[in-house]
Image (cartoon, rainbow, N blue to C red):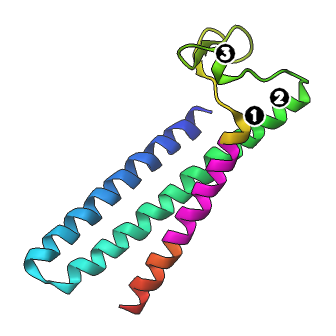
């Protein structure tokens, strides 16, 4: 579990760095008009969108597994509206004593899939533009 969290953290830092690098390259291009900078920026954008897609797919798998676990245990899911802060301290299981965020699983599933599809399409489109340059 810890290795997955470390990989996910690295992917998230990587995507932000790639977005920042790409944006800086585009800004520099505005002043230098060097076409190599645009190609490097597109490479960075492809990498950033690909990492975003990967992170969202991992998140979607975790959310769907959590939903399956709730159904398997015949548990009643908590609703975020029931908690003032949106967090709760877990009293049982492997996360006992830790603070956990309470989310609407269905809502989270839908938006994670939408985000993954959108970032995947952006990555493909950006790659196609890069190839055409």
Q: Quadrant of residue 133?
A: bottom left
Of badges 2 and 3, the one in the foreground is 3
Magenta segment's dominant SS is: helix
**Side (left or right) of 47 relative to 85:** left
Label 3 Cα neighbours within 10 Å, binned few <14 / some 14-19 / many ≥20? few
Residue at numbered disc 1: 66
Label 2 Cα neighbours within 10 Å, binned few <14 / some 14-19 / many ≥20? some
Q: Quadrant of residue 93?
A: top right
Residue at numbered disc 3: 82
The percent position of residue 124, horizontal first and vertical second, equals: 53, 76
Name of the residue lying farthest toward the bottom: 132
Alpha carbons under labels 1 and 3: distance apart:
19 Å
Q: Quadrant of the N terminus?
A: top right
The answer to whether one can see residue 62 in this image is no
- Please report the residue visible at 50 percent of the width from the left and 56 percent of the height from the top: 52
**Side (left or right) of 86 relative to 72:** left
Q: Are marks 2 and 3 in contact (CB under 8 Å)?
A: no
Name of the residue lying farthest toward the left: 31
Q: Quadrant of residue 108?
A: top right
Q: Which tag, 1 or 3, sits closer to the chain's start? A: 1
Q: Are marks 2 and 1 in contact (CB under 8 Å)?
A: yes
Alpha carbons under labels 2 and 3: distance apart:
18 Å
The percent position of residue 28, horizontal first and vertical second, equals: 13, 70
Residue at numbered disc 2: 70
Front-most of residues 8 and 126: 126
Q: Is residue 120 magenta?
A: yes
Alpha carbons under labels 2 and 1: distance apart:
6 Å
Q: Are marks 1 and 3 in contact (CB under 8 Å)?
A: no
Does residue 49 sit above or below 99 in this rendering?
A: below
- Please report the residue visible at 66 percent of the width from the left and 12 percent of the height from the top: 90
Specify start and end residues of the magenta stretch as a single range: 108-122
């Amino acid at each position: 579990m810890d290795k997955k969290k470390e990989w996910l953290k690295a992917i998230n830092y990587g995507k932000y760095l790639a977005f920042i690098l790409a944006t800086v390259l585009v800004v520099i291009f505005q002043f230098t008009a060097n076409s190599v900078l645009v190609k490097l920026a597109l490479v960075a954008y492809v990498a950033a969108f690909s990492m975003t897609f990967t992170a969202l797919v991992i998140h979607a798998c975790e959310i769907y597994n959590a939903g399956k676990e709730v159904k398997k245990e015949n548990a009643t899911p908590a609703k975020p509206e029931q908690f003032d802060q949106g967090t709760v301290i877990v009293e049982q299981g492997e996360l006992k004593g830790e603070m956990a965020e309470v989310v609407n699983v269905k809502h989270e599933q839908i938006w994670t899939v939408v985000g993954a599809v959108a970032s995947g399409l952006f990555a493909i489109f950006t790659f196609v533009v890069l190839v055409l340059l």
